[in-house]
Amino acid sequence: HPPSSPCRCCHPAVALPDSTMAELPAVLGKPFQPALEKFCRVEPALSLEELDELQGLLKEHGTLDCSRAKCKDANGKPTGPFSASAANAKGDHSGSSMFGSWLRDNCIIAYGLYITDPDGQGCEDAKACLDSIAKFLLTHESYRMELVIGGHKEVTGKDEKSWMDRPHIRFIGETGLEDTKWYNHKQNDALGYFLWTRIQLALAEKMPMTGEHLKLLGQLFDYLRTIECWDDLDAGHWEEHSAQHASSLGPCLAAVKAFKTLLAKEGYLAPCKVDSLDILEDKISASLKQILPNEVINPAENAKDADSALIFLCYPLEVVDDEMGGKILERLKTCIGDIAMCRYRKDSYWCKNYKDQIGDDPTKHFTDEELKERDALLVPGEEAQWCLFDPMVSAFYGKMYQKTHKAEYLKLQQLFLSRALAAITGDDCEFGAWMCCEAYYLLGDKWVPNDNTPLVWTMVDLAMAMSEMKKSLSSVKKRPAAAMKRPASAMS
């Protein structure tokens, strides 16, 4: 955390012994919601009883209720997808781009709903969400991909108009129609997340493949091959600077590997060119080997050695091995703030007094040239702190603990879960209490939630983190007492 970064205004860091703080990669502050303070600690880890109590408290306040963001048609019937932000005390975000449905957000939401409620309504909502995305892609985007695959459209150049000729990664959830306004749709990670999530539900036998969906998946893989996604300069998770993003390549590689597993399990013939899957796996793997643990090395002007989007390669995608996951987490220490984590250092989105500097639409989309102007507004250390990531860091350490039963991983899992809980909005939040924010930004000298509150992506990330904590605590309970003793050496 840079020395120039303003302190946490609303609640100072918890006073912990110097020896304890010295070994922690992040600060834990007092929660904005006082009722959560008993759960926000470094150690000991929560008990299963405390976790149940916590889940009951969040349920009582609707903190993780994603149904508030379900898109509905003119008759009030849910259409399947979710808007990016759920309704809050000031409205439902209509008129803002956050009322739209992003493929990336929706696929992570769908996976989270399924994995945390595999036999209940969560899984049903996940299936409805994925089905709506597949319908949108088949109806409106398949012809775009065929034009590219057939060589009739070139979409990999610098012409910003051509970015609308790519399959659209954001649509109008209420109607299932395209949004015709210009948008930077060169976001390969979004396509990868759809492929991967749809395949996960098929592998789990929750949503068996249909002929139409198999056809769509094959087409998407052929499209990614045609644009040579392993070298493609896309906009990445944050829809910004054109570059070769590791966080875009990860979801695509995870999808390829999962699809090969599904084909072998079901005996399907690959519904794409005979060598597409092998080419994609080989080429994407080679690119990731060159880039990771960086996010971007090409072009050099947009290089990033740390980007919080990479946590999704560690969890839930699990497309990197544990060693690389550790390297990514080491890099991400530079992104950790007192409240949450910045997307990357020198990120100007929601920088200090953002609305005053940018204008009335805080969700405005930027071209590459406009981004350079926006970036000039940032003072280093004043990057917004995003609430998406701490839950995923916690979940990753949970997976590590479940594999190794090393106490330091459980401690880190608890720390980052506590940070995620501490960021839930307080009673003084203008958008409402007990909400999961997109980010906190500086308004004057005070850190406040940004307008995109509550963010459904954050909500489902927190639900997944709590699910992984339950798995970890259950494994603790099953182990003999002697095996639970903390190692003498602490993690540095």
Image: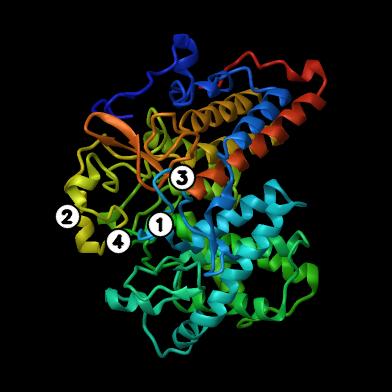
Dot placed on the residue nearer the N-terminal end, 4 or 1:
1
Residue under circle 4?
365
Give the percent coordinates (x, y) of residue 235: 36, 62
Say which element carries label 3: loop
Residue under circle 3?
454
The tag on residue 98 is 1
Dot placed on the residue nearer the N-terminal end, 2 or 3:
2
Q: CA–CA distance between discs 1 and 3?
A: 10 Å
Dot placed on the residue nearer the N-terminal end, 4 or 2:
4
Tell me the quarter of the image containing the N terminus: top left
Q: Mark 1 near mark 3, Cβ–Cβ under 8 Å?
A: no
- What amino acid is labelled 4 in the image? His
The tag on residue 373 is 2
Q: Mark 4 near mark 1, Cβ–Cβ under 8 Å?
A: no
How crowded pointer 3 is (Cα within 10 Å; few <14, some 14-19, many 20+) is rated as many
Any part of residue 256 in sight: no
Give the percent coordinates (x, y) of residue 16: 47, 12
